[in-house]
Amino acid sequence: AKTTMGKGSRKGGGGGKSSSDVCWSGADHAIHNEERQRKLEKKKIKQSREGHVSQKERRTRALTHGTGEKREDLRLNLHLTKTKRDLAAMKERLESYDPVEEAEKEKAAAAKRKLDQAQAENTTPKKKKGRKGPETWKLRGAARPAHEVYDFDVRYVDPHAEAHKKAAARAQRSQNLLAIYKGRFGSDTIPSVCRDYLGLLMQVGHLSIEGKQFKSARQAWLECIELEGDDDDSPVTSARESLMRMYLDLKRFDAALRLGGERLAKDTSVWIRYSTALVALSNSSDDGDDDDANKKNRKSAKTPSSPPISPQEHLVNAIRCNPLCAYY
């Protein structure tokens, strides 16, 4: 119970109690401390979710040289930059894929592997004996034949015209594998370079998560899902599970529900189905006591075009994928 004090009492304020003639009891102080502690915990969770660093800690990091944390951040950034460059080069290669050039590259790589294996076994490959003939010599300067220098010779070949001819032939052979095999990158009948591209996408996603670049990770994994196909029941990568886990760790429950309930509605993975069911069940039961972050996410979420699926239907789909998990 609150008691009144005289005129000489100290003016107090906290929790909306600014009157000078009110004295707090022990229960009032306990309620005030609990509310203050709750606000501090909520602020700490928000700062950790956003990767917040205090000004003092930021100043200490800037003035400290050669720390282990700085070296790890630099190593991570270098690795992420290199992987993104390899991904861009691989994408350009897939957009203008030439089967003839790729066959030559594969042949050269096989020869190199064979040579490395022979050197590792301490068995040098056999060398051809004898000197090569003049037909293999590359003459320079005044020793070159006339048909390589003078254009009036009937045997003269214009190097620019020859290069243009090769470029035109290459343009006719080139294929855009990203458009041809879109949705089928998990198949075994497509070139192996497609799976290498999926591997680079997964590396970019995981490195971005480690560097707290969640937007980049989301873009990489969504592209991976799109190339594999939304309706594919046997994906070759774990992009779906990784994206769902990222949404759950960031408490983006609406995004996780859209991913599992709309985009991956036909996915039979137990992880996807049970994660979607638990998120739907949690959203339906905790509508009244959500925190501010979840309320903000719910307001910004778009209303789906089709009617939403009930949590019971999500649970039924999850149990159909694996009935044994229902016991847990």
Image: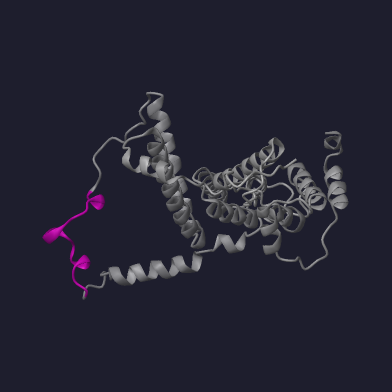
Instruction: Provide residue 147's location: percent of width, then percent of height.
Output: 22, 67
The structure residue drawn at horizontal position 84% and vertical position 51%, both measured from the top left corner, is: 311
Instruction: Answer whether residue 136 is magenta in the image.
Output: yes
Instruction: Provide residue 302's location: percent of width, then percent of height.
Output: 71, 65
Q: Nearer the viewer, residue 267 or 205?
A: 205
Q: Nearer the viewer, residue 105 or 229?
A: 229
Which contiguous range is marked in magenta? Answer: 134-151
Q: Nearer the viewer, residue 192 or 196?
A: 196
The structure residue drawn at horizontal position 50% and vertical position 44%, both measured from the top left corner, is: 207
Instruction: Provide residue 315's location: percent of width, then percent of height.
Output: 85, 47
Q: Is residue 126 left or right of residue 260?
A: left
State the quadrant of the C terminus. top right
In this rendering, the answer to whether 241 lies above or below 168 is above
In this rendering, the answer to whether 190 lies above or below 160 is above
Q: Is residue 27 left or right of residue 153?
A: right
Instruction: Provide residue 187's location: percent of width, then percent of height.
Output: 66, 50
Asked if one can make out residue 237 in the rendered structure from this viewpoint, the answer is no
